[in-house]
Amino acid sequence: MLKFTKNKAEKIATIHGTLTIKEDGTVEGLTPEQEKSFSNVPGFEFTEDKKPAPKKEDTKEEAKPTTRKTTPKKTTTRKPATKKTEDK
């Protein structure tokens, strides 16, 4: 989270675009990577958001027996092509 300590409730033009500063000093309009780049700029205070990482549920699927029966691929025998010749 990025906070601006000087003037509150205004807009500032930066290299990343226009930033909106709320009444409480929080800055809107930046990605987290861009907020980190503003941590060294005078007047800005950067604090990392400590949100718990989303829990990943085990999505392992159990081996279920299939009800399909596998059958061998059917092939057909081809008749040899005979040339037709016309006798005149």
Image: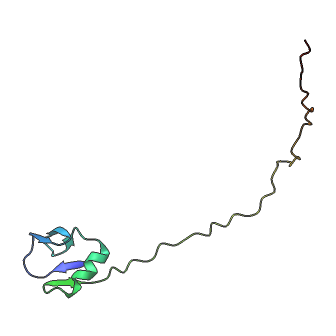
Question: How many numbered marks, from 0 up?
Answer: 0
In the displayed structure image, the side of residue 79 where residue 30 appears, left or right: left
| Residue at position x 25%, y 81% in the image | 37
Image coordinates of residue 52 in percent, x first then y, are: 43, 77
Residue 29, placed above or below residue 3: above
In the displayed structure image, the side of residue 59 where residue 79 appears, left or right: right
* Most foreground residue, 46 or 76: 76
| Residue at position x 89%, y 16% in the image | 86
| Residue at position x 51%, y 73% in the image | 55
Q: In this figure, which colouring scheme has been used for the structure?
A: rainbow
Residue 73, placed above or below residue 39: above
| Residue at position x 29%, y 71% in the image | 31
Quadrant for the N terminus, please: bottom left
In the displayed structure image, the side of residue 61 where residue 49 appears, left or right: left
Quadrant of residue 2 in the image?
bottom left
In the displayed structure image, the side of residue 13 where residue 86 appears, left or right: right
* Most foreground residue, 66 or 76: 76
Quadrant for the C terminus, please: top right
Residue reaching furthest to the top: 88
* Most foreground residue, 2 or 16: 16
Image coordinates of residue 9 in percent, x first then y, are: 9, 70
Image coordinates of residue 72 in percent, x first then y, are: 89, 47
Quadrant of residue 3 in the image?
bottom left
Residue reaching furthest to the left: 7
